[in-house]
Image (cartoon, rainbow, N blue to C red):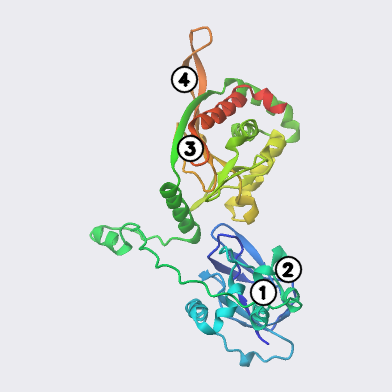
């Protein structure tokens, strides 16, 4: 029986993607684990593996097609001896509306458990496994997948027992009207009808950034804590270390020290190592520090996991690797998702200070400005010149209160002003 291959969800937040490149052609034989295509998400280009074996009977979505919704048919896989001419598949662009209509019909009510978990989380299953589940009345939420990344495959459902008949749920209350999201494109374009402009279509990354930042500013109660830190001791210590590490080809940046200082501070003030989880707070044990990396058209926040346990040279090498692969969109989802805290450093661009927007579900983000020479009053009450860097901690008040945030920021400053302590 012909099996539809659907556009996969390659990350928990993926809703649509671009089919960048087919690595198979019609008539090719594939088996589970073979790479079939390269798919661009809003953040990365990833390889898509076959989860069933068969012959590629028909390719439904051409290379370069953008905005392909998750679970839209992109190809058809045939079993041995099947004829491609017998394939009857709805066009890709019509698949989503038809799927919605089918889900609403009475005849497919028993298939509802196979579509998603009761919590709303997406289930990763092959098309063949989904079809067998529907035919047998099997609840996929009760199945543990043995395929790649926990995907449910044919073998997982063949021996499973049918689920009990679902109890009809009471009708859901009508959704309230969505709040206005600003002027429409046509309204804005009319305002500039007599002016010359270039219209830039939003790609997946830009749409995701716009949605997440809008969510952050509308739903997160931000407050801001500002402090200055003197960097002279750190700059001297860094110069000494870099001279000693020169033979190994290692050159530490100020940002490497900031990452380490924040990682250690999250351990010193563990209540700040936390994220907002809807109706509760999750307190993390390791210091997983995200660092904003600007790329063309947007940004990534790759995560340095267990940063408190790593040396400065290890953090430096790992950060360089992540930043390099971020610029070519080669990061895997687990490399830019997670963490409880982020750093956004615009100091190298000459920005003195700024307020960063929290990246949900993080509890806070540190905005780092440039280190500049300024007059200061030293411990003897005399005016001296020091290298001073401004930092602003944006805090989610649902997760961290003011005094706790101030305690964390002080811990960061203590680490930076006494850099040798970070090696202990």
Residue 141 picture location, percent across and down: 65, 68
Please tell me which of labels 2 and 4 falls first in the chain.
Answer: 2
According to the image, label 4 marks what residue?
374
Nearer to us of marks 3 and 4 is 3
**Disc 2 designates what residue?**
147
**Label 1, label 4: how far apart the Cα atoms are:** 62 Å
Q: Which of the two discs, 1 and 4, sits closer to the camera?
A: 1
Which quadrant of the structure image shows residue 200?
bottom left
Residue 43, placed above or below residue 270: below
Q: Which SS class for mark 4?
A: strand
- Spatial CA distance of label 3 from label 4 is 24 Å
For the residues bearing labels 2 and 3, Cβ distance under 8 angstroms: no
Of callouts 2 and 1, which one flags the residue occurring earlier in the amino acid sequence? Answer: 1
Disc nearest the viewer among 2 and 4: 2
Quadrant of image for the C terminus: top right
Find numbered disc 3 in the image and state the secondary structure of the residue it sits on: strand
Asked whether disc 1 touches disc 4, contact meaning CB atoms under 8 Å apart, the reply is no
- Number of labels in the image equals 4
Q: Please state if 121 lies on the left or on the right of 205 as rendered.
A: right
Dot 1 or dot 4: first in sequence order is 1
Tell me: residue 301, above or below residue 250: below
Q: CA distance from mark 2 to mark 1?
A: 9 Å
Q: Name the spot of residue 63 as percent of width and height, x first.
A: 57, 73
Q: Which residue is mark 1?
A: 126
Residue labelled with disc 3 = 394
Q: Residue at point 68% right, 23% down?
A: 420
Q: Give residue 50's position: percent from left, percent from top.
A: 70, 73
Res. 291 image quadrant: top right
The answer to whether the residues at label 2 and label 1 have Cβ atoms under 8 Å apart is yes
């Amino acid at each position: 029986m012909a099996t539809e291959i659907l556009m996969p969800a390659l990350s928990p937040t993926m809703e649509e993607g671009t089919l960048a490149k087919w690595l198979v052609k019609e008539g090719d034989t594939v088996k589970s684990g073979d790479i079939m295509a390269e798919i661009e998400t809003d953040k990365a280009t990833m390889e898509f593996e076959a989860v069933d074996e068969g012959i590629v009977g028909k390719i439904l979505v051409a290379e370069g097609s953008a905005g392909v919704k998750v679970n839209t048919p992109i190809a058809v896989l045939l079993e041995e001896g099947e004829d491609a001419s017998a394939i009857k598949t709805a066009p890709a662009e019509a698949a989503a509306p038809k799927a919605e209509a089918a889900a609403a019909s009475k005849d497919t009510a028993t298939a509802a458990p196979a579509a998603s978990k009761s919590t709303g989380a997406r289930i990763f299953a092959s098309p063949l496994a989904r079809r067998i589940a529907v035919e047998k009345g099997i609840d996929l939420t009760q199945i543990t997948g043995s395929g790649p990344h926990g995907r449910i495959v044919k073998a997982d459902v063949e021996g499973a027992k049918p689920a009990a008949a679902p109890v009809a749920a009471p009708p859901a209350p009508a959704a309230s009207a969505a709040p206005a999201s600003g002027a429409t494109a046509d309204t804005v374009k009319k305002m500039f009808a007599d002016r010359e402009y270039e219209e830039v279509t939003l790609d997946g990354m830009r749409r995701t950034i716009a949605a997440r930042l809008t969510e952050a500013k509308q739903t997160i109660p931000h407050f801001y804590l500002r402090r200055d830190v003197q960097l002279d001791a750190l700059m001297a210590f860094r110069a000494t270390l870099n001279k000693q590490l020169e033979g190994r080809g290692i050159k530490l940046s100020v940002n490497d020290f900031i990452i380490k200082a924040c990682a250690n501070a999250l351990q010193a003030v563990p209540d700040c190592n936390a994220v907002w989880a809807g109706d509760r707070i999750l307190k993390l044990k390791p210091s997983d520090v995200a660092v904003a990396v600007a790329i063309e058209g947007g940004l990534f926040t790759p995560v340095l996991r267990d940063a408190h346990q790593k040396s400065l040279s290890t953090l430096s090498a790992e950060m360089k690797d992540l930043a390099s692969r971020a610029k070519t969109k080669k990061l895997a989802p687990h490399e830019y998702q997670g963490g409880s805290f982020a750093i956004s450093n615009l100091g190298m661009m000459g920005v003195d200070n700024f307020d960063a927007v929290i990246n949900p579900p993080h509890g806070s983000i540190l905005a780092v400005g440039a280190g500049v020479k300024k007059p200061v009053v030293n411990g003897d009450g005399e005016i001296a010149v020091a290298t001073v860097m401004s930092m602003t901690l944006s805090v989610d008040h649902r997760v961290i209160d003011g005094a706790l945030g101030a305690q964390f920021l002080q811990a960061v400053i203590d680490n930076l002003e006494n850099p040798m302590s970070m090696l202990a």
